[in-house]
Image (cartoon, rainbow, N blue to C red):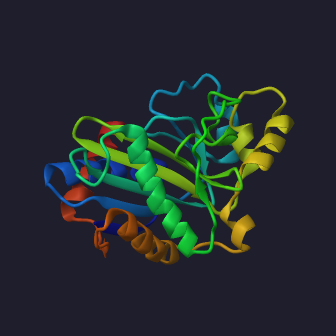
Amino acid sequence: MRLIIDTYHMGEWNMSCDMAISNYVHSKHKEPTIRIYGWTIPTLSLGKHQKLKNIDLEYLKEAGIDLVRRPTGGRAVLHNKEITYSFCCSENYPKLPSNVVKSYMKISEGLTKALNFLGVECDVEKIKKENLSKDICYDTPSIYEITVGGKKLIGSAQYRNGKTVLQHGSIPQIFDYDNYVNCFKINNKEKMIEHLKKNVIDVFSLKNKFIEFEELAYAFKIGFKEVFEEDIIIEGFSNTELKMTKEILESRK
């Protein structure tokens, strides 16, 4: 299994890159790939089919928040002061269950083992809870997502096209409650902020410090090796992946 330690990019580049890796892994019959990356500026990502009508575009503009659409489903996430991971493999990869929920669970096991190594005692959510909002991802943990004491830590989403599996998720270092809620056209924003504060946790609250990319990568090597029983090799992008990223980026404009 390959692990890429990336850096900070704009939202469109990040989404194009994840798609490029996913396509490359399938077309070149390459090993599953994990990527760790960040965001150059605060960016609100929308699920593939999420509507814009409840997004406050004027606030995004005023606050300098970028907007991007993910290839995966789910609800909106504000990427700011976080580390994002992606996991890409062919759909016929024998060590990932073909069942969608079971595949989420297995990837979540790798994430859990990695965070446990870093001293974060977390669990995989096993109970489906009712969402308060159809737009705000972090209002409640979904089944299979990572929680600490019942509070949501990692929000993830998955994409399948019959050939590849792409899953990516947000690991907030410091959760930006105010900006997140202000991105939406909703009533009683103060109530939603208080709800999130009771139901969300971030890395800084747990460890009183940030996790560095390299630190998380080392933990991923341990966690995913244990769960998938694969050697994890740190590598860079191939020239083909960089070319594909640029091509997908152009097609998204």
Q: Is residue 138 left or right of residue 19?
A: right
- Residue depicted at x 50% and y 67%: 113
Q: Residue shown at 48%/54% (left/top)? A: 108
Relative to 202, is 105 on the left or the right? left
Please identify the residue farthest to the left as the structure is shown.
28
Say whether residue 71 is visible.
Answer: no
Where is residue 219? Give x, y as percent: 48, 74
Quarter residue 53 falls in: top right
Asked if residue 183 can be seen in this view, the reply is: yes
Against 41, residue 196 (above or below) is: above
Quadrant containing the N terminus is: bottom left
Image point (35%, 51%), residue name:
18
Q: Residue at x 59, y 47 (%)?
A: 125
- Residue 233, image x, y percentages: 29, 74
**Extreme-front residue of the structure:** 126
In the foreground, 238 or 145: 145
* Image quadrant where one finds the C terminus: top left
- Compare residues 165 and 6 and report the one nearer the observer: 165
Q: Position of residue 228 (x, y in %)?
A: 33, 63
